[in-house]
Amino acid sequence: MTNPSDISQLPATGAIQSSTEAIAQAWFDYLVTAHPHHTDYGGIVWHGAYIAWMEEARVECLRSIGILFADLVALGCDLPVVELAIRYHQPIRMGANVNVKTRMVGVSGVRINWDYQIQAIDTADVFATARVTLVAVDREKGKIMRQLPPAVKDALLKLSDT
């Protein structure tokens, strides 16, 4: 059993270690404050809040390059999460200000991979690392698309250039 004091020493999981394709791409920063409603009775951020913050960061990153989620819906395209790997390194406490860093690390067909680091703003402390895979789904048919809509594919190329 892992000693709770050793939690910060856990390495990132293999699924979320930096890859060579990710190194070339810049992180998008999304700042968050851990409010009381994010925490349990002990003042520790609930594990699901991390996932919500990661989605907020991803949506804002897409917005920053001109992709609004409402536009995806209008195109008939949903991007649900189909895989999620997260490593919690150390707890975030109520009142902490954190940076949810995200970057798209690759598109393979209709699969879009994103990496995350949740860390303290004023120190190098890392609270969590994660990898999320999205898949393009036709909203009307409820089936995985054969290819990304051209407008989405073109916009995602902007993330590769940053």
Image (spheres, helix red, strand yellow):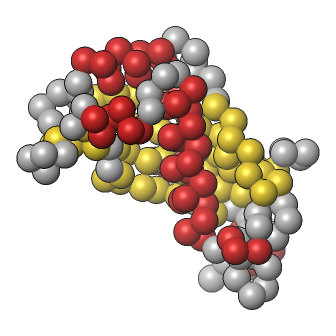
- Asked whether the viewer can see residue 143, the reply is no
Question: Is 40 situated left or right of 58 in this image?
Answer: right
Where in the figure is residue 103, as x and y percent of width and height?
Answer: 55, 32
Residue 64 visible to an observer of this rendering:
yes
Kindly give the residue lying farthest to the left in the view shown.
141
| Outermost residue, top side | 161
The quarter in which the C terminus is drawn is: top right
Q: Residue at x 76, y 63 (%)?
A: 34
Vertical order, 150 against 18 (above or below): above
Vertical relation: 126 (above or below) 34:
above
- The number of numbered badges drawn on the structure is 0
Residue 44's quadrant in the figure?
A: bottom right
Q: Residue 32 at what x, y percent from top left?
A: 74, 52
Judging depth in this view, the residue of 20 and 24 nearest the camera is 24
Name the outermost residue toward the right. Answer: 122
The image position of residue 39, as x and y in percent, is 71, 76
Which quadrant, please, contains the N terminus? bottom right
Give the side of residue 31 with respect to residue 14, left or right. right
Q: Is residue 148 left or right of residue 19?
A: left
Residue located 12% across and 31% down the image: 146
**Residue plotted at (40% across, 19% down):** 155
37 w.r.t. 60: above or below: below
Say if 20 sits above or below 73 in the image: above
* Image-based side of 77 in relation to 156, left or right: left
Q: Residue at x 9, y 47 (%)?
A: 141
Front position in the image: 18 or 93: 93
